[in-house]
Amino acid sequence: MRTDALLWAEIKRARAKWGPRPLSVVPEPVGPGEESVWDYPRPPRVEPSSARITVEFAGKIIVETRRAIRVVETAGAPVYYIPPEDIEMRCLEPVPDYRTLCEWKGFAVYYDLVDDGRRSEKAAFAYPDPFTDLGAGYDAIAGFIGFFPDRVGAAFLNDERVRPQPGGFYSGWVTDAVKGPMKGVPGSGSW
C-alpha cells in the first residue's frame, strides 16, 4: 500500500510532465465567439457558468441549471459541474470501490445513471474532497457532479447538443465554439 508521501510524489511527477504545447500540434483557427483549447491553462481554471445546461436520460430531463461551474484545461474541452440541487439525484447510484485520480483536482467518485430499467455505467462523477494545495479554487466543485455526454441520452449547452471529447476517457463537452485539436485523438497520449 502506498503512503501519502509516495502518492504525493507520484502526483507531483504527473504535474511536472506537463509542458508547453507540443510543436507537432497546430491549433485550429479561432473566430469570433470561439475558444481554443490551447488557450486554456494548466493547471485547470475553475469559473462560474450561466449557460443553460440540460441533461436527458431515459427520455427525461434529469438536469436543468444555469448554476454550473466550468473547468477548462489545456487541450481539453470544458467540463461542466452541476450543483446536486439541480439534478434528479434519484437517478444516480454510487459505484462502490471505484475512483480515479486527477493530478490537479484529486480523487473522483462515480455514479451509474439508473431510471425506468435503464442503466448507464459510470455516466457521472464528482470530486467530494478536491485538492486545495494549488489554491486554484477546486474546492468550488466539491460535491458538484459532472456528466459524460456520451453516457447520457443527450446533453445540451444552451440550445446546442454537446458532443463528447474524443477518446472516451475525458468528460469534456465539445461544442461548435470549442476548437482543438483535443486530447483523446490518436497520438495525443503525451498532451
Image (tube, rainbow, N blue to C red):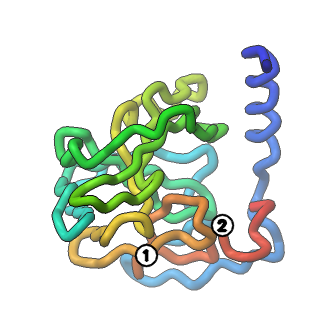
- What amino acid type should be assigned to the residue bearing mark 1? Arg
- Secondary structure under the numbered disc 1 in the rendered image: strand
**Residue at the outermost front position:** 117
Name the residue that disc number 1 marks.
Answer: 163
Report x, y in % for residue 33: 37, 76
The quarter holding residue 163 reads: bottom left
Above or below, 81 against 191 in this view is above
- Residue 175 visible in the snapshot: yes
Q: Do the CB atoms of the residues marked 1 and 2 lie less than 8 Å apart?
A: no
Which of the pair 176/143 is nearer the observer? 143
Which of the pair 24/32 is nearer the observer? 24
Residue at image point 40% right, 59% down:
120
Residue at image point 35% right, 33% down:
143
For the C terminus, the quadrant is bottom right
- Secondary structure under the numbered disc 2 in the rendered image: loop
Tag on residue 183?
Answer: 2
Q: CA distance from mark 1 to mark 2?
A: 14 Å
Decide: few, some or many residues near mark 1? Use Cα within 10 Å; few <14, some 14-19, many ≥20.
some
The quarter holding residue 182 reads: bottom right
Left or right: residue 178 compared with residue 158: right
Residue at image point 31% right, 62% down:
118
Which of the pair 17/90 is nearer the observer? 90
Report x, y in % for residue 98: 56, 38
Tag on residue 173?
Answer: none
Label 1 vs label 2, nearer the camera: 1
